[in-house]
Amino acid sequence: MLWKQFFTPVTSIDANQAKKLVLDEGADNVTFLDVRQPKEYMAGHIPASHLIPMGELDKRLGELDPNKPVVVY
């Protein structure tokens, strides 16, 4: 079941660590996932981030590349 993925341990990082991740991995090799609502996303978001509102995440996990690190905000 996909919902079980929500219970796996995750690492929290700050903005500087996210920037370093992009520098180390390359911008095309990191996914920034915005889990806010569309109105919030339209008001401002990280360029090239992927919008999947939190309430839809369980149904749309297949849209994410499992081989790339994902930074969720």
Image: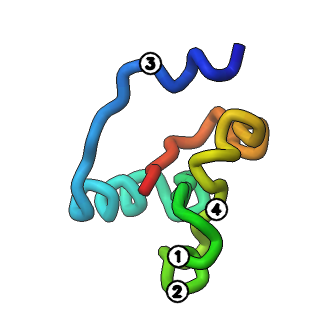
Q: Nearer the viewer, residue 31 or 60?
A: 60
> Which numbered disc, 3 or 1, marks the residue closer to the eye?
1
Q: Residue 24's image quarter? A: bottom left
Circle 3 residues within 10 Å: few <14, some 14–19, many ≥20: few
Mark 1 = which residue?
A: 40
Q: Secondary structure at mark 1?
A: helix
> Which numbered disc, 2 or 4, marks the residue closer to the eye?
2
Give the colour scheme of this rendering.
Answer: rainbow
> Which numbered disc, 1 or 4, marks the residue closer to the eye?
1
- Which of marks 4 and 1 precedes in the sequence? 1
Label 3 vs label 1: CA separation? 27 Å
Mark 3 = which residue?
A: 8
| Residue located 60% across and 78% down the image | 39
Mark 2 = which residue?
A: 43
User: Residue 42 vs residue 26: left or right?
Assistant: right
Circle 1 residues within 10 Å: few <14, some 14–19, many ≥20: few
Q: Residue 47's image quarter? A: bottom right
Dot 2 amino acid type: Ala
Dot 1 amino acid type: Glu
